[in-house]
Image (cartoon, rainbow, N blue to C red):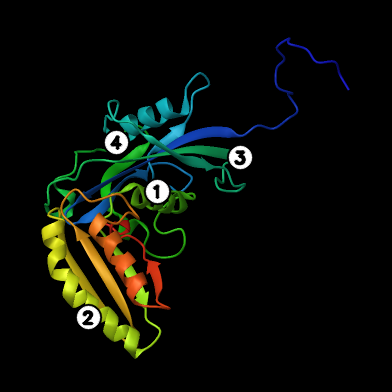
């Protein structure tokens, strides 16, 4: 074993190294749907295909700085004053036909655009550098088709990860709780409790739009309680005090009830 040393040494010349790129997932809602900023590749590989804006990191450049630079060069969109969020590192062998390329991916959700058709309210973009075109493409269109969607490289997987991260960080627009009652007697007690307490919930929680309990089709002993929030949302997986009190009342009154907090309604943007 060689002796430890503080002396700087170069990387071994015989050791192959990967190239580093930086890519950006920029999202916004416009024209009634979520859109992602894409560029049409103007050169191989995947010439003519949609891809996320991005490119190679310069030797003396930070990946986040490179992501912002490439975004500006390829789309004309300047996000220098907007904080990108780190998404992850994508480096599966074979993801780029040119060789071993590892991408540092970043994402951001911009303020909603105007509700015009075809994303008319989104910030203006135009293809530049090696991008033949830039556009705010509906997410559903970008991911249509097979696992790769309509995107080059592994950018469909990167986009899906960004959408999941975005959904997890969004304020919930409501919360849903499922109750599975053990028998008809318990169901009757539950329904009676709902009739007694639900009308007063809105008065107790003025920031809440409504509380609703629905039956579950095909499952006569199941009920789903919905608490829908007013504009501004509420922390994901967190019920308002009135709902928490209601859950406690149900547990006290109905023995054997199974309670399951469902995915917050805000996890899927409207």
Tag shown at residue 192: 2
> Is residue 48 at least partly visible in the picture?
no
Q: Could you tell me how far apart the alpha carbons at marks 4 and 3 are, in whole angstroms?
A: 26 Å
Residue placed under numbered mark 1 in the picture: 165
Residue 54, picture quadrant: top left
Choose the circle earlier in sequence order: 1 or 4: 4
Q: Where is residue 141 drawn, in percent x and y?
A: 31, 59
Give SS at disc 3.
loop
Q: Is residue 20 above or below residue 111?
A: above
Number of the front mark, 1 or 4: 1
Q: Quadrant of the C terminus?
A: bottom left
The residue under the point 21% across, 41% down is: 111
Number of the front mark, 3 or 1: 1
Q: Could you tell me how far apart the alpha carbons at marks 1 and 2 are, in whole angstroms?
A: 40 Å
> Is residue 105 at least partly visible in the picture?
yes
Give SS at disc 2.
helix
Number of the front mark, 2 or 4: 2
Q: Where is residue 132 drawn, in percent x and y?
A: 32, 41
Q: Nearer the viewer, residue 267 or 248?
A: 248
Q: Nearer the viewer, residue 182 or 91?
A: 182
Number of residues whose C-alpha sits closer than 10 Å to that of mark 2, classed few (under 14), some (14–19) or many (20 or more): few
**Outermost residue toward the right?**
1
Residue placed under numbered mark 4 in the picture: 75
Choose the circle earlier in sequence order: 3 or 2: 3
**Outermost residue toward the front?**
252
């Amino acid at each position: 074993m060689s002796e430890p040393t503080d002396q700087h040494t170069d990387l071994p010349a015989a050791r192959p190294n990967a190239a580093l790129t930086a890519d950006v997932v920029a999202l916004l809602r416009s024209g009634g749907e979520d859109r992602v900023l894409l560029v049409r590749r103007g050169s191989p590989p995947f010439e003519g295909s949609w891809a996320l804006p991005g490119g190679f990191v310069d030797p003396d450049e930070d990946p986040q700085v490179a992501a912002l630079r490439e975004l500006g060069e390829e789309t004309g969109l300047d996000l220098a004053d907007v904080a990108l969020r780190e998404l992850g590192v994508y480096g599966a062998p074979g993801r780029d036909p040119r060789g071993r390329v590892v991408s540092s991916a970043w994402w951001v959700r911009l303020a909603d655009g105007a509700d015009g058709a075809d994303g008319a309210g989104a910030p203006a973009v135009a293809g530049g550098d090696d991008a033949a075109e830039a556009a705010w493409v509906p997410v559903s269109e970008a991911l249509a088709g097979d696992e790769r969607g309509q995107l080059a490289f592994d950018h469909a997987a990167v986009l899906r990860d960004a959408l999941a991260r975005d959904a997890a960080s969004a304020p919930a627009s409501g919360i849903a709780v499922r109750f599975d009652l053990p028998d008809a007697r318990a169901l009757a007690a539950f329904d009676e409790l709902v009739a007694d307490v639900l009308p007063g919930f809105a008065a107790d929680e003025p920031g809440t739009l409504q509380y609703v309990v629905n039956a579950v089709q095909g499952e006569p002993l199941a009920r789903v309680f919905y608490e829908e929030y007013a504009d501004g949302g509420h922390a994901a997986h967190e019920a308002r005090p009135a709902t928490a009190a209601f859950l406690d009342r149900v547990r006290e009154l109905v023995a054997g009830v199974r309670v399951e907090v469902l995915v917050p309604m805000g996890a899927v943007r409207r």
